[in-house]
Image (tube, rainbow, N blue to C red):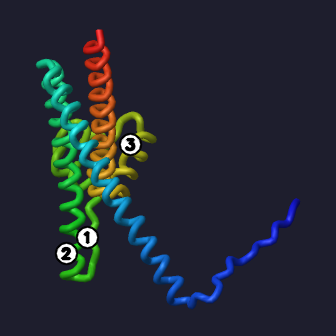
């Protein structure tokens, strides 16, 4: 391993305040140059993106719009579940701030409300077969909060649909570009 000596730069007869002032002037010049260049790059990028988006939208077909609307519908529906989960947490926080006691809302509360006197509810209360599965399902429904059961799947669904839609749009864009070259 080699050892390199570090030599401190010699400031000379200039005082510390003069050295700082000179470097601040240089820093200001660099900043002004960078902002000028970034504004030019940003302007060119926006113009290019506008041109490419007009090209892309003009080549879309009815099937593309239908698939896009279906994707937006799935994202919107999942967003409703996300909003309801966040609202439930907000309601729990409100009740907690009022009384100082955290109100639990496990999945079983919604299950009992929605599936009262149905076959799944009867199986869950009095199973004749698959007793081990019933115990697992019952434990999960009593221990997983309803807000978590609403929020996590909706985030996964929204993220998945955004990724799939982005990939589909990128594929179609390059497909249109390839057709345009031919």
> Regarding mark 3 in the picture, which secondary structure is present there?
helix
Q: Quadrant of the N terminus?
A: bottom right
Pick whichever, 126 or 9, lies toward us: 9
Q: CA distance from mark 2 to mark 1?
A: 7 Å
Rendering coords of residue 67 (x, y %):
18, 25
Callout 2–callout 1 Cβ contact below 8 Å: yes
Q: Earlier in the sequence, mark 2 or mark 1?
A: 2
Q: CA distance from mark 1 to mark 3?
A: 25 Å
Q: Earlier in the sequence, mark 1 or mark 3?
A: 1
Q: Residue at x 18, y 44 (%)?
A: 115
In the rendered image, which residue does mark 3 sit on? 134
In the rendered image, which residue does mark 2 sit on? 95
Pick whichever, 129 or 148, lies toward us: 148
164 sits to left or right of 19: left
Q: Residue at x 21, y 52 (%)?
A: 110
Rendering coords of residue 143 (x, y %):
37, 57
Could you say which disc has been placed on residue 103 in the image?
1
Q: CA distance from mark 3 to mark 2?
A: 32 Å
117 sits to left or right of 144: left
């Amino acid at each position: 391993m080699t050892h390199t000596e570090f030599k401190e730069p010699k400031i000379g007869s200039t005082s510390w305040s003069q050295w700082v002032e000179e470097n601040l002037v240089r820093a200001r010049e660099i900043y002004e140059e960078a902002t000028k260049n970034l504004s030019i790059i940003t302007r060119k990028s926006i113009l290019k993106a506008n041109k490419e988006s007009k090209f892309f939208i003009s080549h879309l077909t009815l099937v593309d719009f239908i698939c896009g609307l279906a994707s937006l519908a799935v994202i919107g529906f999942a967003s409703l579940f996300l909003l309801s989960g966040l609202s439930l947490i907000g309601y729990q926080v409100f009740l907690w701030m009022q009384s100082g006691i955290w109100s639990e809302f496990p999945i079983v509360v919604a299950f009992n409300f929605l599936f009262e006197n149905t076959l799944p509810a009867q199986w869950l209360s009095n199973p004749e077969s698959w007793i081990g599965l019933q115990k697992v399902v019952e434990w999960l429904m009593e221990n997983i909060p309803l807000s978590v059961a609403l929020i996590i799947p909706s985030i996964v669904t929204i993220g998945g649909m955004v990724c799939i839609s982005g990939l589909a749009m990128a594929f179609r864009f390059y497909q249109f570009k390839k057709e345009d070259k031919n």
